[in-house]
Image (cartoon, rainbow, N blue to C red):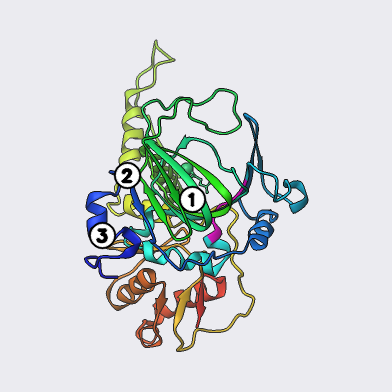
Amino acid sequence: MDLDAPTALLAGLSPAQFMRRHWQRRPLLVHAAWPDVVPPLTRPQLFALAADADVESRAVVRSGGRWSVRHGPLSRRSLPPLRQPGWTLLVQGADLHADAAHRMLQPFRFVPDARLDDLMISWASDGGGVGPHVDAYDVFLLQLRGTRRWRIGRVRDERCVEGAPLKLLRRFEPRYDWLLGAGDMLYLPPGWGHDGIAVGECMTASIGFRVPRHAELAHAMLLSVADAVSDAHSGGGVPYGDRGSAATTAPACVPAALQAFARDAWVEAVRDPLAQARALGQWLSEPKPRVWFEAGRRAHSLGARALALDRRTRMLYDADHVYINGEALAASGRDAQCLRRLADERALPAAEVGRLSRGGRTIVQQWLTAGWVHER
Ligand code: SIN
Ligand code: CO
């Protein structure tokens, strides 16, 4: 991708300009961002996904001023009739379930994969929507079919309507009011309230980006450190000893020597300079809950054919490691080059597969057997 080339997707801005001017800063409305867009799923396909227990879905119905929300799996019969106004069906992670949906993410890969969350697809009957709300993440809202009216405004008061079954802003003050037709797109940074109402039946894709927070990262990384400590010291590690300690008149007081011993254990556990980056990479590449790979269906061995990542595979890398579906692999030299290319392009030409070392081939063979990678 040429980061300096103007693109219709971003209203004639280049990806580099978009990132400087809009990303996390201000919304961007793009008419004809994707002029000939074809919904990656038909309505029946979307409804079939919503009925699947491995798919995250919800239905939001508004009737008068009352809202109701139901979470999947949602059988067709449990949903309102198509002609009933004011309801919507939302399917998360459509990219995990359909190659065509996964391919729609490709033009947005000027943003690091580490930030990507998923592609959600919604279908709405006339007047349907999820009400005025604010999200904590960046999103591209791409109109796939039909027309939607978007009202947006910066949120100054985040309080929500009490007792409502979904997050609805108590005070929403829209600043812009736009009609988006098929192929039009709206980028919204976090903190912008929005209310999208279907004008007639419509379908919308949301390309959403995760915004990790300090606390969840600290939690994930400390869990990973804990796992590493358990693996390294299956026998429990160095025992505390207090031979020679004095008798005490304050039996409830924690001994200073034990505090120092614990401090040493703590320092030892986080001593590995690569541990923190490794824990981050593992966490970021962890597959979403309810993701299954079709493992071992055909246990063929790695040949000399090109490779492609399964659409569900999350693969990332840093200076020292390659991460795939929550696992870390120290990689250097030619193997690192090949595997980084596989991660960036989500594919690897046959000639590059041939350059892998014996160890590299063994690893990729395991990924093939696990269904994380496929031969083309
Ligand atoms: C939608 O209804 O498709 C979009 C949901 C949202 O506003 O985040
Ligand atoms: Co939203």
Name the residue that disc number 2 marks: 268
Residue 95 location (% of width, % of height)? 52, 61
In this rendering, the count of numbered labels is 3
- State the mark number for residue 13: 3
Q: Which residues are magenta?
A: 88-94
Residue 232 location (% of width, % of height)? 42, 53
Q: Residue at x 56, y 42 (%)?
A: 129
Query: Which kind of residue does numbered mark 3 sit on?
Result: Leu
Question: In this rendering, would 86 be left or right of 222?
Answer: right
Question: In this rendering, would 372 be left or right of 335?
Answer: right
Question: In this rendering, would 348 be left or right of 46?
Answer: left
Residue 336 location (% of width, % of height)? 32, 72
Q: Quadrant location of the N terminus?
A: bottom left
Name the residue that disc number 1 marks: 234
**Comparing labels 3 and 1, the label whose residue is closer to the camera:** 3
Q: Is residue 245 magenta?
A: no
Q: CA distance from mark 3 to mark 1?
A: 55 Å
Task: Give the camera-side residue of 322 and 260.
Answer: 322
- The verdict on label 3 being within 8 Å of ligand 2 is no
Query: Which kind of residue does numbered mark 1 sit on?
Result: Ser
- The verdict on label 2 being within 8 Å of ligand 2 is no
Task: Give the camera-side residue of 303 and 238.
Answer: 303
Which quadrant of the figure has residue 85? Answer: top right
**Comparing labels 3 and 2, the label whose residue is closer to the camera:** 3
Q: Is residue 90 magenta?
A: yes
- State the mark number for residue 320: none
